[in-house]
Image (spheres, grey):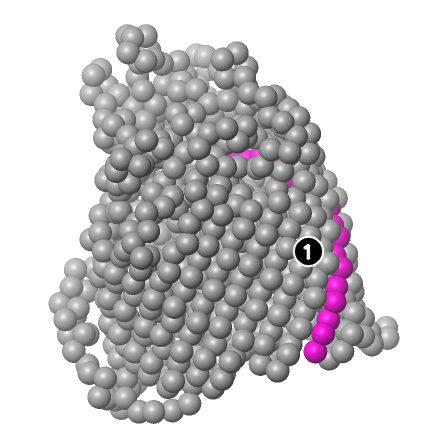
Amino acid sequence: MKCFVPVRLALLLPGFCLTTLSVAEPLELDPSVITGSRSASPSFDVPYSVDSINQEQIQDGQLGINASEVLSRVPGLVVQNRQNYAQDLQISSRGFGARSAFGVRGIKLIADGIPASTPDGQGQAATFNLDTAERIEVLRGPAATLYGSNAGGVIQMFSRDGEGPPRIGAETLVGSDGMSKNHLTAEGAVDDVGFVLDASRMDTDGYREHSAARRDQTFAKLNLKPDEDSKLALIYSSLEQNGTQDPLGQSWEAYKADPRSVTPNALIYNTRKSIDHQQLGMNYERYIGDATLQVNAYTGTRSVIQYLAIPKYIGNTTTLNPANERGGGVVQFDRKFYGANVHWIQPITSAPGDLTIISGLDFDQSRDNRHGYQNYNGEQFGVKGEMRRDEVDTARSLDPFVQANWAIDNWTVQTGLRYSTMEMDVDDHFLSNGDASGTKRYEKATPSISVMYAFTPELHGYVSAGKGFETPTQAELAYAPGGQEGFNFGLKPSESTQYEVGLKAQLNNTRINAAVFQITTEDELVVAGSEGGRTSYQNAGRTLRRGFELGIESQLSEHWTTTLAYTRLQATYDSDFVSGTGTNRKEVDKGNYLPGVPQTTLFAEVNWKPTDWLSTAFEGMYRSKVYVEDTNTKKAAPAYTVFNWRAQFEQKVEHWTFHQTLRLDNLLDRQYVGSVIVGDSNNRYYEAAPGRSWYAGAGAQYSF
C-alpha cells in the first residue's frame, strides 16, 4: 500500500478554476427501500419506521472510515465512536444494544445480504465498507422482529453495482492525531459484466494514548446477468487490523485530569487486538413467471487475538488472580462461519389490490475454536502464557418465516411470522478444571403486524405491533455468576412487546416522519458481576421504553437542504431487582434509567450546494447525559453539544474528475465523553472524544 504515498501532493494540485457551473441535484424525498418489505417499495408507502441514507450522504465530505459518520442522521439510533478500533462502534436502536461492551449486539447488521452479526447477535460494524456503499437502510420498531432474534433494529448496507464506462481512481486523506487513509478503486462494466474493486489503508495514532490502529480493507464485486430472467452478484471482502491498541476506559478523575490518558494496566499488559476477517458471498435472483426466487449464500473466516488487562495478582498481594488462572487474559479464536437463505416472493394476482406473499428460510452458523491463555510469563506481562481455556463454541440458527404485504385502496397491511431459533453448543477440551460442555437452545415465534392508511396522497398514518426476543451472546454466556466454572446456561432470553404509531408526510419539498413507540421487556439481560476482567450476566425484571422520533428533510430552495433527527426516549426499569452477590451486591430500583441510553438526541444539518462542484454543510449534535450503571449513582456522562463543518469540491476535465475534501469536527473544541462502557467493574466507564480535529483529502478518477 506504500504506492499511495507519492500521489498525495499530486492529487491536491488541481485548482478550482477547472469548474463549470450547473444546477444541483434535488433532494430525494421518497427513496425506495427493501428492508422490511423485502422488495423495493417507496419508504413513504411502508407502514413502519425505516430510513435510507444514499450514496451522496455517505460520501459527501465524510471520511469513509466509521458508520457513525452517517448513522447519526437517523432518529432512534445512538451511535457512539469509542475512539477505540479494538472495540468497534457502539450502536443502539431505541435502547437495544446500549449495554454492549464491545462491538454491536441486539441489532441485526447485514451487508449485501451477508450477516455482519453472528447467530447469537454479536456484530461488527467495522466490516461495512463505506467506500463501496450505495445506500444504508435502517429499520426500527416491531417490523424488525421479522429478521429474527436480536433484531431490535436492522442496519443493512448495499454496495453499488459496477455500471458505466470503466474508471480507476485514487484518493488520500490526512488529519489530526496522525490519521491517514489511502484508497484505490476501479469500477465499471465490460460486456455487461459489472465490477467494483476497492482497497484502502487507514492509519491513526489515536486521540488517546495507546490507541493507535491500522485498518486494511479490500472489496471485490462482480455483477452479471446469466440470462434475461436472472441476475447474479459475487462479493468478496476482507478486514485486517494487526496490533490495534486498546486504551480501555477511564475513571472520571482520570478523564477530567487528562482526556487523553489511559490506565496504567493498559500499558503494563500492552492491551491490543488483531483481526483477520475474510468473507465470500453470492446473491442470485431469478424471475419465474410473476414470482421471484432469491438465493443468498456466504462463507468466511475470522481470526482474533486480544490481550486483556486482567491482572496477574489480586490487589497488591502475591495471590494469583483466579480469573487469570481460570480463563486467561489472552483471548484467541478462529471462526468459520457460513449460511444461506432462500426467499420466494409471490404476487397474488387473484386478490383485490396488490398482495404479495414472501416465504423464506434463513440458516446461519458460526463455529469458534476458542482458546484462553494467561497474559503473562513469569513476571513478563502482555505476552501469551500458559493455556487456560480450550473449547469449540458453535452458534447456529434456522428460521422459517412467512410475510404478507397487501395494498388495497387507501390501506396497506404488512404482517408476518418468524419462528426464530438459536442454539449454542460448547465442547470443552480443557478438562483440568472440570467439563464446561453443554448445549442451550432458544426458540420463539415472533409475530408482527403493521397497518397504514393514506389520509391524503401527502399524509399517511400507521400503527405497528410485534413481539421479539433477544438471546444471550456467547460473551454473555461465557461466565457463570460468582466466579463459578462453566457457561451460564441458566440465562434466559429477554422478550419484548413493541407498539408504534407513526405519521409520514410529504409537504411541498419536505419529508416528515414522526413516530411514538412503547417497548416492554421481560428478563432484560444485565450485568450480574464483574471481577478480575470476567463479567457475568443475569436476567433482571421488566423494562419500559417510551419514546418519540422525528425526522425532517427539506429542500428549502434549489441549493439549500436541511436535515433534522430528534429522539426522546424514556428507558427505565419497570421492577426492582438485585444484581451481584456479597460486596458486589447492588439493589436496582424501579424507575432507574437504563445505562448507556441518553434521553434526548438531536442531529441537525444545513447543506449548501450552489453547483455540482461545491457542497458545504454545518452539522450540530446534542446528546443528553448518560447513566453508566444500573443504580444511577455513579457520575453520569454529561450532556454535550458539538458542531462540525465540511466541504467537498469537484472538477471535471475531459476524462478526469478531481475532488477535494475539507472537514473540521468539534469546531468549538468541546471536551466531552463520547461513549461509555456500561457497568465496568473497575469504574472506568468513560471514553473521551477528541477535541477540535481537522481533515483534508483529495482524489482523482480517470474514466476510459
Residue at point 25% right, 61% down? Answer: 694
Disc 1 secondary structure class? strand
Q: Tell me: 607 left or right of 338.
A: left
Residue 160 image offset from top left, x and y in percent: 45, 71
Residue at image point 64% right, 51% down: 547
User: Quick check: 317 left or right of 489?
Assistant: left
Residue at image coords 24%, 66%: 696
Q: Position of residue 658 (x, y in %)?
A: 26, 79
Q: Is residue 36 magenta?
A: no
Q: Where 23 falls versus 111 (above or below)?
A: below
Q: Nearer the viewer, residue 179 or 592?
A: 592
* Up-down relation of residue 295 to residue 95 (above or below): below
User: Considering depth in this image, is 61 or 134 the residue closer to the camera?
Assistant: 61
Tell whether position 467 is magenta: yes
> In which image quadrant can residue 504 be found?
bottom right
Please state the horizontal and vertical placement of residue 56, each as a whole percent of the image.
43, 73
Is 507 drawn above or below residue 342 in the view shown? below
- Image quadrant holding the C terminus, namely bottom left
Question: Residue 454: which quarter of the image?
Answer: bottom right
Q: Is residue 65 visible?
A: yes
Quadrant where the N terminus sits is bottom left
In this view, the residue in front, 448 or 292, is: 448
Which amino acid type is shown beneath numbered disc 1? Val
Residue range highlighted in magenta: 458-480
